[in-house]
Amino acid sequence: MWKIVGYLPPKGFAAEMEKAQAAFVNRPKWEEALKKDPNNLAALLGLIPIYVQEGNGKEAEAMLRRAEAQDPTNAEGKLDDAYNAIGDAYQMQDDHAKAVPFFEKAAQSKDEDKAAYALISIAYCLFAEGKAKESIPHLERLIKMGPAADDYREQAKGMLAQAKR
């Protein structure tokens, strides 16, 4: 089962549906690959969001640690989706303090879609923790981003106005 919590704009919703389809089709292949090689990077990265969706965040985070060991600098950005997924897992559990560091890693992505999602997620987490003022630089960065931030820009502007009060 693949669940989406809260609102996603059409582009984001379509992307989530694509991930759900890929998970359904590829899960058996990825699980088999991990049986043969517990550090298979492609399999780890494919299974992390599935485990998060199933509520198995601890196992997903353990998989992320194995993936990070293979690519400690995230040189090619392959870990970005995993960082956002683990952040989502903690955010769904209302453990915002644990979510933020994962979103911060994803916010460094060269892929602006992934970075924009991470930035709005950081802001949400900080608001939920009563730290709205700390969200200001993240929201300002998001607002200045290119078209990838369009789906979040108005929400970010509203949050920024609140944070500056």
Image (cartoon, rainbow, N blue to C red):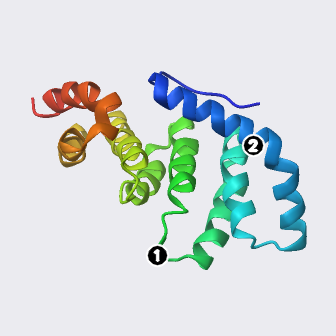
| Front residue (pair 108, 163) | 108
Give left or right: position of 79 versus 39.
left
- Residue shown at 23% from the left, 44% from the top: 145
Residue 141 spot, x, y in % from top left: 21, 47
Residue 116 spot, x, y in % from top left: 35, 43
Q: Amino acid at mark 1?
A: Thr
Q: Gap between marks 2 and 1, in whole Å? A: 26 Å
Q: Which residue is mark 2?
A: 23
Q: Is residue 144 above or below residue 37?
A: above
| Front residue (pair 10, 60) | 10
Query: SS class of the residue under badge 2?
Result: helix
Q: Amino acid at mark 2?
A: Ala
Q: Are marks 2 and 1 in contact (CB under 8 Å)?
A: no
Packing grade of label 1 (10 A; few <14, some 14-19, many >=20) is few
Q: Quadrant of the N terminus?
A: top right
Question: Quadrant location of residue 20?
Answer: top right
Question: Quadrant location of residue 17?
Answer: top right
Q: Is residue 55 visible?
A: yes
Q: Which residue is mark 1?
A: 73
- Residue shown at 40% from the left, 44% from the top: 113
Give left or right: position of 154 versus 25.
left
Q: Of label 2 and label 1, which has the lower sequence position?
A: 2
Query: SS class of the residue under badge 1?
Result: loop
